[in-house]
């Protein structure tokens, strides 16, 4: 398995009223080719900021992101080279939560899509490619002459996917792509996103706060809290054997899927604090039901449970031993 | 007919809204009963009329909304025969409501303590007593420590805390019915679990009924006793939550439940519902779901399906027999 993304000690801080908000703090991980990498966490956990840093949309405060031959943050020289920026944009695309705000309401859908195609210099203006992709997402070609306000949320999200796929990217980031949609429409979009990887040989990163959605679609999942990684592992392992108290709490707080389901719930108290004044020890200390004194003082390292399963928790280190 | 155990009975409710494109038939003749002490879910997708139904009970209508027919009985009294003033007396003390976004429901310029006390003094509670009761209410809904939280402004509190404040305001005059319109949709999962737990405890402790408006079947499974499934302004299936999850009879209900990802759906295609809901500007003659239903036949488009009951606690509207 090749590595497509390598994120090294990435940090993004924002100044807030004389203090520092640490949205992403020293994150290191890799994304393998042709996998779907899930990032979950509550609002304020830094998952969208992480995504933006990786897409070169915001400049990180520290650390770097390696994508193919490109190292970000890019040098001044590289940034001024339109060819390099264009090739980066061709290789990495994004689908956002709200498709209506990512299309210009005064432009027909056709114009928006053909603009993208001509920017990337597709043959014949990209007509064949656009038609092929519309067929793939199961939309009639008549949408091309329409405006975004005449289309439903599900249709718009399918068009956002079409636009992202136009330049045949190697990597697509989906940031909460189904959160604004109704359940029946959500299923259509999830099916398309789930198939995309094989059909187009893509790698994807899937950002979501919804665990069932992430479980359905991802291969590996990273759980974030206050800008840091709490746990990382393959889906089966993370859902079958969650080790971090925060992961367990997240799984416990999912609503039942059926009223007959028996559930012993460990209710998590409090709410995610602001990312200003991050505590000295474990970030989850203030809400952790299992915390001991050490947790409030020393930040836990990432402990390796198996080759693919990592946990940042002192208590887990004591049970699995330090590898 | 309505029974003594019903707190609220909605009969053949029809509500229309004026839109730029014409008259939208948002609620097309629904029957719904909420019993005393139960949590009754109304579940459906955007535009199915669930919020308009909830607002009809409180008669919280925007100018473009008009009631075109039906009745709402509250403890046997026809609410539509009441004057605006009489309705106002009922709001808060008999029926109250919480909304999806607590931030926009509170006034940003006043402390939450002031706003909470105001709801009490408006109902004739003396100032001193209102202050004491406000502290007690905040404590009941888990806003801690209540004394210092009282002097905070909405912007100083998180979404979860604000929703707790809204719940405190809503229950301040001991209503018999609390309408909760997507109360956890804008909250994180861990906070959602806390709010659902709080609502269940309040129901148990106060023997209050809750009408839970949601698009999330998980919330229905979690806290509701009975549920009504809405589609295109009508109720397609209604009854005991367990029965409906075990044995959904209306194709829309089962299609919707099947389209939710869950453990075990990984790597599979989710069931989808083809097409889109009907345009409610037009008259619908037959079953509203027929154009998207895989079982639909000629009769479905001709006349509205008659309601069928398979047990005292489970009914649905579909011609397909069992």
Image: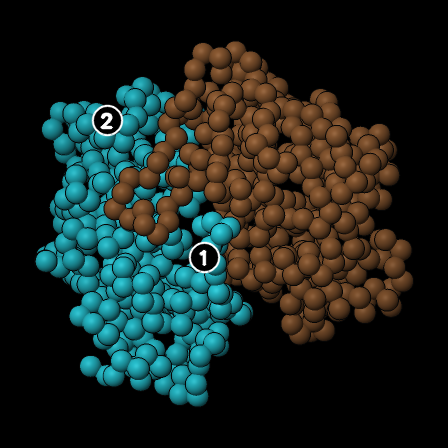
Chain colours: A cyan, B brown
Q: Nearer the viewer, mark 1 or mark 2?
A: 1
Residue located beneath label 1 in the image: A254
x then y, percent, for residue B150: 71, 68
Which class describes the residues within 10 Å of circle 1: few (<14), some (14-19), or many (20+)?
A: some
Q: Is residue B266 above or below residue B130?
A: above
Q: Secondary structure at mark 2?
A: helix
Q: Residue at x 88, y 59 (%)?
A: B125
| Quadrant including the N terminus of chain B | top right
Side of B192 where A110 appears, left or right: left
x then y, percent, for residue A212: 38, 52
What subunit carries mark 1? A
Q: Quadrant of residue B75?
A: top right
What subunit carries mark 2? A
Q: Residue at x 75, y 69 (%)?
A: B135
Q: Is residue A267 above or below residue A132?
A: below
Side of B150 where A321 appears, left or right: left
User: Closest to the observer: A116 or A305?
Assistant: A305
Side of A246 where A165 appears, left or right: left
């Amino acid at each position: 398995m090749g590595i497509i993304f390598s994120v090294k000690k990435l940090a993004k801080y924002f100044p807030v009223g004389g203090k520092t908000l640490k949205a992403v703090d020293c994150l290191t991980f890799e994304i393998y080719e042709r996998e779907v990498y899930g990032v979950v966490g509550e609002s304020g956990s830094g998952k969208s900021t992480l995504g933006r840093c990786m897409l070169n949309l915001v400049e990180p405060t520290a650390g770097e992101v390696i994508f193919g031959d490109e190292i970000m943050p890019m040098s001044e020289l590289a940034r001024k080279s339109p060819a390099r920026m264009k090739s980066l944009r061709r290789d990495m695309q994004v689908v956002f939560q709200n498709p209506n705000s990512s299309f210009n309401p005064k432009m027909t859908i056709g114009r928006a899509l053909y603009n993208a195609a001509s920017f990337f210099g597709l043959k014949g203006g990209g007509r064949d490619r656009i038609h092929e992709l519309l067929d793939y997402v199961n939309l009639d070609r008549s949408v091309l002459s329409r405006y975004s306000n005449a289309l439903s949320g599900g249709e718009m999200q399918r068009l956002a996917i079409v636009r992202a796929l136009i330049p045949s990217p190697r990597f697509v980031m989906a940031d909460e792509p189904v959160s604004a949609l109704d359940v029946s429409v959500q299923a259509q979009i999830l099916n398309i996103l789930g198939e995309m990887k094989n059909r187009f040989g893509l790698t994807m990163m899937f950002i979501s706060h919804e665990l069932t959605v992430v479980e359905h679609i991802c291969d590996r999942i990273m759980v974030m809290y206050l800008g840091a990684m709490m746990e990382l592992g393959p889906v089966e392992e993370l859902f079958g054997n969650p080790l971090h108290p925060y992961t367990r709490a997240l799984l416990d707080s999912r609503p039942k899927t059926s009223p007959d389901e028996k559930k012993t719930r460990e209710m998590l108290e409090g709410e995610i604090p602001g990312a200003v004044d991050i505590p000295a020890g474990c970030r989850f200390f203030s809400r952790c039901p299992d915390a001991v004194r050490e947790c409030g003082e020393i930040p836990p390292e990432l402990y390796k449970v198996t080759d693919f399963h990592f946990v940042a928790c002192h208590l887990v280190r004591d049970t699995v031993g330090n590898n | 007919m309505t029974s003594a155990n019903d707190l609220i009975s909605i009969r053949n409710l029809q509500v229309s809204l004026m839109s730029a494109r014409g008259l939208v038939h948002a609620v097309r003749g629904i029957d719904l009963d909420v019993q005393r002490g139960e949590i009754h879910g109304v579940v459906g997708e955007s535009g199915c009329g669930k919020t308009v139904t909830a607002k009809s009970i409180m008669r919280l209508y925007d100018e473009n909304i008009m009631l075109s027919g039906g009745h709402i009985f509250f403890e046997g009294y026809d609410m539509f025969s009441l004057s605006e003033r009489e309705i106002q007396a009922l709001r808060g003390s008999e029926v109250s409501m919480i909304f999806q976004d607590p931030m926009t429901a509170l006034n940003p310029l006043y402390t939450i303590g002031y706003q909470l006390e105001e709801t009490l003094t408006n109902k004739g509670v003396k100032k001193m007593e209102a202050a004491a009761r406000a502290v007690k209410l905040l404590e009941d809904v888990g806003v801690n420590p209540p004394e210092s939280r009282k002097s905070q402004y909405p912007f100083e509190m998180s979404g979860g805390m604000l929703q707790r404040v809204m719940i405190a305001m809503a229950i301040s005059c001991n209503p018999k019915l609390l309408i909760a319109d997507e109360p956890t949709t804008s909250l994180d999962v861990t906070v959602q679990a806390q709010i659902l737990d709080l609502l269940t405890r309040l129901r148990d402790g106060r023997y209050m009924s809750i009408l839970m408006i949601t698009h999330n079947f998980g919330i229905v499974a979690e806290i509701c006793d009975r549920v009504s499934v809405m589609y295109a302004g009508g109720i397609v299936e209604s009854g005991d939550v367990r029965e409906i999850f075990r044995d959904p009879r209306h194709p829309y209900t089962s299609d919707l439940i099947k389209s939710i990802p869950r453990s075990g759906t990984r790597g599979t295609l989710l069931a989808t519902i083809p097409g889109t809901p009907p345009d409610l500007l037009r008259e619908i003659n037959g079953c509203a779901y027929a154009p998207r239903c895989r079982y639909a036949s000629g009769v479905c488009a001709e006349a509205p399906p008659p309601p069928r009951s398979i047990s005292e606690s489970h009914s649905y509207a579909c011609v397909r027999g069992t």
